[in-house]
Image (tube, helix red, strand yellow):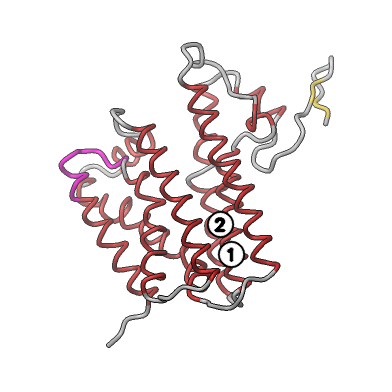
Amino acid sequence: MMQHPYTIALFAILAVAIASWVISVFKNDVSFVDSLWSLFFLLAAAVFANETLPLGARGMLVVALVTIWSLRLSIYITARNWGEPEDYRYQAIRENNEPGFTFTSLFIVFGLQGALAWIVALSLLPAISNDAALGALDFVALLLFIVGFIFEAGGDYQLSKFKSRDDSKDKVLDTGLWKYTRHPNYFGDFCIWWAFYLFALSAGAWWTIISPILMSILLLKVSGVAMLEKTISDRRPKYAEYVRRTNAFFPGPRRSQGATGEVRS
């Protein structure tokens, strides 16, 4: 009996998640799941493409874009975390789930991220498998992807250069893309996943809108903006002033502060 490509993708993602969990047990560090996050989507895209061959123009384009986005993000996160101790977020999760975190991390870290990636990857399936000709909406999607990639990759590059400076410890990056939004990399990811949905929409799969909606919730309310801003003010005292002057997510002009302390647009 033939399995549906979406089901095959789930099994593939969970297999990688379980194997990665085994490695984390020996390393006593679950942080590298962050490097796997984007690779889960590449794996799903590969499954969808393999089950669809030969690919149409849209399918080839989407697979190429997923590959570029996924590998860039995974390599960046791996390089950033190389040689570092377990990320503070996972240290907190570990402390809150002891004793027994070694076992439960299979479900609350690796399994959870794998399952979320599988749901978000839903829009990739029709975008890759549909062989209809490219239309105007596909070009809008491509443009949105490019904008998103510039914000995400550019924001990551600017942040890494900033953190490499000896005097950056107590300072806040407020130049470049970070002048217009406090989270250009997350905004870029947001654009990228709405772009993938537009590819799916162009293929007639309007119902896959759950994919970008879930990713947007994760970025804004769960593991992205909300989680980072809970602690960053404690680590960087000047961040509160940065918050008053700079949009949280969607880019916009910097707000100036008058002599009375009033914030002006």
Residue at horizontal 40 percent and vertical 75 percent from the top? 53
Residue at horizontal 49 percent and vertical 70 percent from the top? 128
Q: Which residue is mark 1?
A: 197
Distance, label 1 to label 2, CA atoms, is 6 Å
The one of 135 and 148 positioned closer to us in this rendering: 135
Q: Amino acid at mark 1?
A: Tyr
Whether tag 1 and tag 2 are in contact, CB under 8 A, the answer is yes
Where residue 94 appears, as percent x and y from the top left, is 29, 40
Majority secondary structure of magenta residues: helix
The one of 174 and 231 positioned closer to us in this rendering: 174
Which secondary structure lies at badge 1? helix
On whether residue 247 falls in the magenta region, the answer is: no
Where residue 34 appears, as percent x and y from the top left, is 37, 44
Q: Residue furthest top?
A: 167
Q: Which residue is mark 2?
A: 193
Where residue 180 appears, as percent x and y from the top left, is 69, 33
Which secondary structure lies at badge 2? helix
Q: Residue furthest left?
A: 26
Q: In the rendered structure, which segment of residues is drawn in magenta?
A: 22-31
Q: How many marks?
A: 2
Disc on res. 30: none
Residue at horizontal 77 percent and vertical 33 percent from the top? 253
Q: Is 105 positioned to the left or the right of 261 in the image?
A: left
Q: Is 18 positioned to the left or the right of 202 in the image?
A: left
Q: Is residue 73 above or below residue 164?
A: below
Residue 132 is drawn in which quadrant?
bottom right
